[in-house]
Image: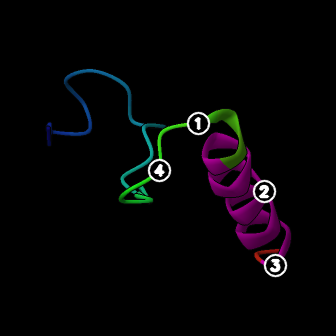
Amino acid sequence: MRVIPDSLNSERQLYQAGAELIGYNDATATAEILVMGVKALSLLD
């Protein structure tokens, strides 16, 4: 959703990321996605 900055919250962030692990549906797969996200975020700063 995009809005005119003055209409709602001008501080709103427009960035997002997504990840999928296809073929697995267990806690290990969920943990792997979370670890990957934390590692990616730690590289940003």
Q: CA distance from mark 4 to mark 3?
A: 26 Å
Residue 27 found in image quarter: top right
- Would you say the magenta stretch is mainly helix, strand or loop? helix
30 is higher (above) or lower (below) than 42: above
Look at the numbered discs 2 and 1 and tell me whether their residues touch, using CB distance below 8 Å.
no
User: Tags 1 and 4 in contact by the CB under 8 Å rule?
Assistant: yes
Q: Specify the label residue 36 is tagged with.
A: none
First-in-chain label (3 vs 2):
2
Residue 29 image point, x, y percent: 62, 49
Of the numbered discs 3 and 1, the one sitting upstream in the chain is 1
Distance between the Cα atoms at labels 3 and 1? 27 Å
Instruction: State the image coordinates of residue 13 (x, y, percent, origin top left).
Output: 45, 46
- Type of amino acid at the residue the image marks with label 2: Val
* Residue 5 position (above or below residue 34): above
**At 42% across and 37% down in the image, what residue appears?**
12
Few, some or many C-alpha atoms within 10 Å of disc 4 (few <14, some 14-19, many ≥20)?
few
CA separation in Å, label 3 and label 2:
13 Å
Q: Nearer the viewer, mark 4 or mark 2?
A: 4
The earlier-in-sequence mark between 2 and 1 is 1
